[in-house]
């Protein structure tokens, strides 16, 4: 398995732009987020090319899929230390959480063997929290919450 930053034998400007998008983000990206970022380097890039490149990079072991219940998959570089994720409910961005409260895996029922775990925290990122406190429109819907219901 080649390191994430190392080009493969099928390195193209599109793949370089996609790799750069994931590396520079520092957080898991959806295919649409990868496309938007990679288009800064390759304006004619299409979503089908992103999906093909992502699939190939997963097969090569340089990219891994991050699954969130009920949401589209995100992608991040492989080879990172074990970590978890934070999902912003306002803007839908996903961020890495470096800590792991691993003690909770001991809560498996007797006789069960835990092979893996994923912890996802949900809430609002600092940008969305600031926006909401200021009464600005929420990122997802584009509308402000009714004044009496803000928290």
Image (cartoon, rainbow, N blue to C red):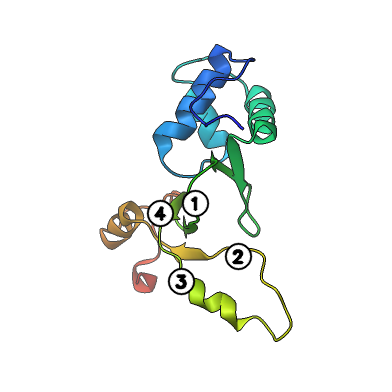
Distance CA(mark 4)–CA(mark 1): 11 Å
Q: Residue at x 53, y 65 (%)?
A: 119
Distance CA(mark 3)–CA(mark 2): 11 Å
Of labels 3 and 1, the one closer to you: 3
> Percent x, y for residue 47?
63, 26
Question: Going by the image, does 89 lie left or right of 64?
Answer: left
Q: Mark 3 or mark 4: which comes first in sequence?
A: 3
Q: Mark 2 or mark 4: which comes first in sequence?
A: 2
Front-most of 147 and 136? 136
> Percent x, y for residue 36?
50, 29
Q: Mark 3 or mark 2: which comes first in sequence?
A: 3
Distance CA(mark 1)–CA(mark 2): 22 Å
Q: Mark 3 or mark 1: which comes first in sequence?
A: 1
Of labels 2 and 4, the one closer to you: 2
How many numbered dots are placed on residues in this image? 4
Tag 3–tag 2 contact (CB < 8 Å): no
Tag 3–tag 4 contact (CB < 8 Å): no
Determine whether 93 is above or below 84 in the image: above
According to the picture, the residue beneath numbered tag 2 turns out to be: 117
Tag 3–tag 1 contact (CB < 8 Å): no
According to the picture, the residue beneath numbered tag 3 turns out to be: 101
The local secondary structure at tag 4 comes to: loop
Determine whether 103 is above or below 41 in the image: below
Q: Residue at x 51, y 24 (%)?
A: 6
According to the picture, the residue beneath numbered tag 1 turns out to be: 92
Q: Residue at x 70, y 74 (%)?
A: 113
Distance CA(mark 2)–CA(mark 4): 32 Å
The 10 Å Cα crowd at callout 4, few under 14, some 14 to 19, many 20 or more, is some
According to the picture, the residue beneath numbered tag 4 turns out to be: 138
Front-most of 78 and 123? 78
> Percent x, y for residue 124?
39, 60
């Amino acid at each position: 398995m080649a390191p994430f930053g190392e080009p493969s034998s099928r390195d193209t400007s599109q793949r370089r732009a996609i790799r750069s998008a994931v590396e520079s983000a520092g957080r898991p990206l959806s295919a649409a987020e990868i496309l938007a970022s990679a288009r800064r380097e390759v304006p004619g890039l299409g979503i089908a090319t992103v999906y093909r490149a992502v699939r190939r990079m997963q097969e090569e072991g340089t990219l891994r899929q991050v699954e969130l219940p009920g949401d589209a998959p995100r992608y991040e570089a492989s080879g990172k230390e074990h970590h978890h994720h934070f999902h912003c409910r306002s803007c839908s961005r996903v961020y890495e959480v470096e800590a792991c409260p691993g003690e909770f895996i001991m809560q498996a029922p007797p006789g069960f063997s835990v092979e893996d775990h994923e912890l996802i925290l949900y809430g609002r990122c600092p940008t969305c929290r600031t926006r909401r406190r200021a009464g600005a429109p929420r990122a997802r819907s584009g509308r402000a919450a009714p004044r009496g219901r803000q928290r």
